Image (tube, rainbow, N blue to C red):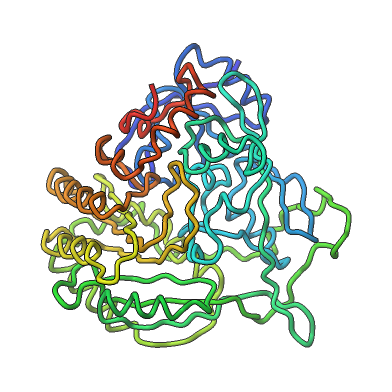
Amino acid sequence: MARWAEREIAGWGRYPRARALVARPETRADVLEAIGDRQGEPILAQGLRRSYGDAALLTGRVIDMTRLDRMLDFDPATGWLRCEAGVSIADIAATFLPRGYFPPVVPGTKFVTVAGALASDIHGKNHHVAGSWSNHVRDVELLLPSGDIVCCDRGINAELFRATAGGQGLTGIVLAMDVQLERVVAGTEVGPRLAAIEMETVRVANMDEFVRVSGASGGYSYSVGWIDGAARGSSVGRGFFMRGRVTGAAGPARVIGTAGSERTAASLDRRQSDVTPRRSLVDGRYLSFNWLLNRVSMRTFNAVLYLRNGNSRRTVTFDRYFFPLDAVKNWNRFYGPRGLLQYQFVVPPDPQNRALHSALDAVAASGIPSFLGVIKEFGPQANGGLSFPVPGTTVALDFPNTGARLLGLLERLDDLVASAGGRVYLAKDARLGADAFRRMYPEWRQWKETRDRYDPGGVMQSELGRRLGLVG
């Protein structure tokens, strides 16, 4: 019998929360046992719970997949890695970056499992050139509620794969997949060197200047911007733009094998000496700045941050460029016991940037402080279904949970975004209504038909799925 323990669980935003019976299997046989032992209740698989809202929550039975974290096979000639669902981006980076490989797409945190990356079809700072996670995986083993295990990717059971990529875990339980890692060793006269990121920071005065700088940055592999969420009028969208490319850094890279060498799981042993973990200088468990998150303090903070970040160029580590917030342990707890809500949306390209101006004006006028604002340009790749990235500009804003006042603001933003032909990122969402969701995701009905065909009994559920009318 599977071992179930009752726990309170929450996403990274710590809002909302749910009580669930949680099992932590270590093998796929354990997962099958847990499915058989669910006693007629709905079920959901979860990873490291870095989705912000209720995508990984279920008042029911939850299977924690983080112990299925084995790397099974690797081909150094092609970069294809076979791994179990619970392997994290942090695991991959620690094992392979010193050897000259890196995940093809990474979000703002490395503490995301590969199954979670597919369930959210994550995007990164290189969407304009690389697309999202599902563009780099194949041979996904998916356990259906019936107990059958099927393989899916863009060439096999493509409809199921398309529903699974961005489907928030509602089509089945991912057991394993192939991920094609990117080669990031920089060649030098003395041999391969450990890669780093050459980062250029450009200060931008407003949204229109951001779009111009972004458009002129096509020669860079990675780009992202910070925006001042409190700026108004002609300064809306001011901030700084950070673009980067891989470059060589001090220290030799360790490369596994050579092109054409035999694939072997034995070479995938994780060696802690390969990567020195960054020490967290601050732990959010012991500090809460919720009392400081007010209109005046945040306007002052954003103004100082804007002025301190002028034009510059420097070489930084992968951690510093891709995962700066991971250096602050439990940073989500800074927002206090009520948690935070992140609002991430994308709107289609518009030469006048009207929807972006209107959304940021509404945020600034509300007086509700936004501590963190991130802006990026998406490329032409759109994967359909419930996958979030579509061509346009995406903005992510973090808000302290102020209750009804904040929820009212976000509902107004929902209408603005939907009217512009945009959408909200479901992996970050905690409160979007079903009607607004259907306006934003016109393929939702086709997605649900596919999902219901593979799960006619409605076994796979989540609080997000229930809220948006995707299950049941």
Give the quadrant of the N terminus: top right
Nearer to me, 145 or 92: 145
Q: Position of residue 152 (x, y in %)?
A: 64, 37
Residue depicted at x 84% and y 62%: 257
Seen in the image, is 335 located left or right of residue 299? Answer: right
Give the quadrant of the C terminus: top left
Q: Position of residue 157 (x, y in %)?
A: 63, 34
Q: Position of residue 253 (x, y in %)?
A: 73, 72
Residue depicted at x 33% and y 52%: 333
Quarter of the image where one finds residue 230: bottom left
Q: Would you place residue 104 above or below residue 111 in this image?
A: below
Q: Position of residue 26 (x, y in %)?
A: 65, 32
Q: Would you place residue 366 above or below residue 266 in this image?
A: below
Nearer to me, 287 or 154: 154
Seen in the image, is 407 located left or right of residue 220? Answer: left
Seen in the image, is 295 located left or right of residue 254? Answer: left
Quarter of the image where one finds residue 42: top left
Seen in the image, is 47 located left or right of residue 334? Answer: right
Residue depicted at x 25% and y 77%: 206
Nearer to me, 385 or 24: 385
**Count of labels in the image:** 0
